[in-house]
Amino acid sequence: MSKKTMKVAVTGAAGQIDYSLLFRLGSGEVFGPDTAVELQLIEIEPALPALEGVVMELDDCAFPLLQKISITADPNEGFKDVNWAILVGAAPRKDGMERGDLIKVNGGIFVGQGKALTKAASDVRILVVGNPCNTNCLIAMNNAKEISRDRWFAMTALDANRAKSQLAQKSGAPSHQITNVTIWGNHSATQYPDFYNAKIGGKPATEVITDLNWLQNDFLSTVQKRGAAVIKARGASSAASAANGAIDSIRNLSQATPAGDWFSVAVPSDGSYGIPEGIVYGYPVRSDGSKYEIVQGIELNEFAHEKMKATLAELESERDTVKDML
Ligand code: NAX
């Protein structure tokens, strides 16, 4: 018999990210061999028949730790009593739609989901993946004031993994030796992947990769624009790697962070590093398994300050676009 059960709600369950994410959650790899998993899958009504097919495939894996699967189009039902809510579902950008229009369309979804999340378990943690994820998280959080702010997260782990992989390939070091990577700010092309504070095999990345021009230009723009490059090559946006980022985020937040390292996730600012309170901003974070802290005292040079200001300006303008939803 399993010792405990983790109830996990996932939205956008018939979509492409979840086609990878649900199977990894069901396998039990995230919460470990002593924890059973119950999946509460949420989709819009027209996608429920397709979701039934995904559930058939989950059944057909006969995962020993996957105890129960339910599907619904009602977020009040889907979020009931969950310990984790992973908000992936969002409307895609349509032809001729401006970024601001998309933010408003998706914002409406996150107002409703924020309200419904108050039905979750008292220890709920929420990870927002659906874009624009920082601002969607801000909206949901502001519509669920009963849930404390330290339970809200938006995903920058995929960006951090992209940064690790670029640094590993350039230096020839294996990716597990790339540590202390931070994605500051927004999950968008304005993000600042911080190579100045990253380490390779315990040494500053800038000592191992001495080509500062490559770091400041090629590295930065490759990570910032990686999502678009994947769409161009694959004809579809990142899916398996995005699901992997969500798995990493949940694991990073559920386990003690190794000594000396940190991980990347966007959280509501407490004012750290001069970011206005409440803005959901990518930070370096450490966890003890249940509580997290923003790592303090990281040295930031003029280059970093400029990049951090630019990504903050974008987040502030997104916040202004949705101010009537907050
Ligand atoms: P898909 O279009 O394949 O799937 C989205 C699913 O969400 C669809 O099945 C749709 O029916 C469902 N959905 C729409 N509104 C819903 C609602 N109100 N409640 C429940 N479900 C709803 O997109 P997919 O490729 O899976 O991407 C999902 C989201 O992740 C997108 O917003 C995408 O931009 C975002 N991403 C975020 C990333 C990150 O690092 N934070 C990276 C990957 C990805 O781009």
Image: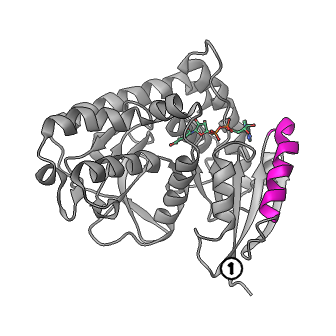
In the picture, measured across the screen, residue 134 lies left or right of residue 190, that is right
Q: Vertical placement of 33 versus 280: above or below? A: below
Q: Is residue 308 visible?
A: no
Q: Residue at x 50, y 47 (%)?
A: 155
In the picture, measured across the screen, residue 163 lies left or right of residue 23, that is left
For the N terminus, the image quarter is bottom right
Name the residue at the bottom extreme: 1
Per the rendered image, the range of residues in magenta is 44-59
Q: Residue at x 71, y 56 (%)?
A: 9
For the C terminus, the image quarter is top right
**Residue 137's spot in the image, x, y percent?**
56, 42
| Near-viewer residue (319 or 39) | 39
In the picture, measured across the screen, residue 46 lies left or right of residue 20, that is right
**Quadrant location of residue 73?**
top right
**Residue 154's spot in the image, x, y percent?**
51, 46
Q: Is residue 278 visible?
A: yes
| Residues packed near mark 1 inside 10 Å, few (<14), some (14 to 19) or many (20 plus) | few
Name the element at disc 1: strand
**Residue 182's spot in the image, x, y percent?**
32, 50
Q: Vertical placement of 81 versus 134: above or below? A: below
**Quadrant location of residue 188?**
top left
Q: Which residue is mark 1?
A: 4
